[in-house]
Amino acid sequence: MPPAVSRETKPTTPADPVRPEDVDLSVRLGPLELANPVMTASGTAGLGLEMEPFYDLSVAGAIVVKTITKKPRKGNPMPRLSETPSGLLNSIGLPNKGIDAFVAKTLPRLAGKARCLVVNIAGGCSDEFAELAERLDGLPGIDALELNISCPNVEDGNLPFARDPEIVRGLVKSVVDVTDLPIITKLSPNVTDVASIAQAAKDAGAHAVSLINTVLGMSVDWRTGKPGLGTVIGGLSGPAVKPIALRMCLEVKRAVDIPIVGIGGIVSVDDALEFLTVGATAVQIGTAHYKTPDVVARVVGELRERLASAGRRSVQEQIASLKAP
Ligand code: RRO
């Protein structure tokens, strides 16, 4: 008797597993191409060179330098840091040697070491932002500018910039008019409607927005009555702010068609992937540097394996994969 022909269909095989080495980590922030989406956050990795003992700077998707201003600044009165049970408060006050020293001394040592070098700048008014941008335009080694319109710790205050869409529009336009460098505008969480600020940045020609800068906060010793920070109020960062940052990235993603760089409390590859899931194209890691200065290299090193384990063939597949109405 001939064998019965099986009518069963071949059992479906699960999709071929993805090999970590096949995962494509590259992303695009407008005109800016990154080999991977993991950047340092401004202010937490010095001028970049300070990270060299910990990893080869070219491992990072991008190195973002601490804010540079037109004139040298000493920074704020001490104490400048106050650790709380749920995050780190800072009021550093943009200490730096000014644009002349950056261009003459730091940039020549830094140029060519990072795969992508982003210079974070801050000015006291739109014209000063434009002046700084014009100065950096065309210099070898600089790939993009990040506009710090959201530092909470300057007494002359540039927070008002980040709070007013009209001011943001004018400021970003004044920069875009004088440079061909890609512009990332760094947004503040200390606003009611972050999407309207992101929209203003986009309308004025920004190529991406990064968010969030630190959340206004303070600490106090109730026995002595002394505040933890010399300036009393400062910016909170660390894992405590991650849910706020994720929410704000999602708000921007839903409302504005502009690449997002997610920042806020990232300490692990899983944290980074959460930001990609809500729609960020890249991430910046900040406060985690103080415990683990090689955190960026670690996260980059784990990214392929982690994405492959979830069947993703690229970072791109993860971006905006949030399952939500
Ligand atoms: O230097 C600072 O105090 C500082 C800056 Br520029 C910033 O953008 N965000 C922050 O929390 N601190």
Image (cartoon, helix red, strand yellow):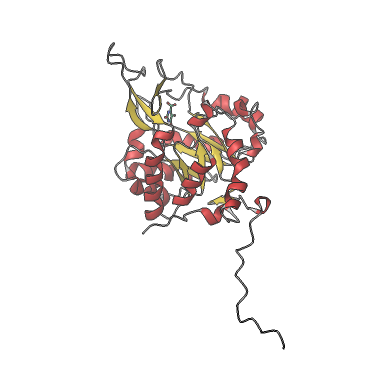
- Left or right: residue 28 versus residue 79 is right
Using the rendered view, name the quadrant where residue 137 is placed: top right
Residue in view at x 47 percent, y 46 percent: 274
In the image, residue 51 lies at what x, y percent? 61, 28
Using the rendered view, name the quadrant where residue 185 is placed: top left
The outermost residue toward the right is 1
Nearest the viewer among 103 and 196 is 196
Q: Where 190 sits versus 19, above or below?
A: above
In the image, residue 35 lies at what x, y percent? 62, 47
In the image, residue 249 lies at what x, y percent? 41, 47
Nearest the viewer among 162 and 236 is 236
Residue in view at x 57 percent, y 27 percent: 102
Residue in view at x 64 percent, y 28 percent: 54
Where the C terminus falls, by quadrant?
bottom left
In the image, residue 108 lies at what x, y percent? 65, 30
Residue 150 visible, this angle:
no
Q: Where 50 sits versus 264, above or below?
A: above
Where the N terminus falls, by quadrant?
bottom right
Nearest the viewer among 309 and 167 is 309
The outermost residue toward the front is 1
Question: Total number of numbered labels?
Answer: 0
Q: Quadrant of ligand 1?
A: top left
The outermost residue toward the top is 224
Residue 53 visible, this angle:
yes
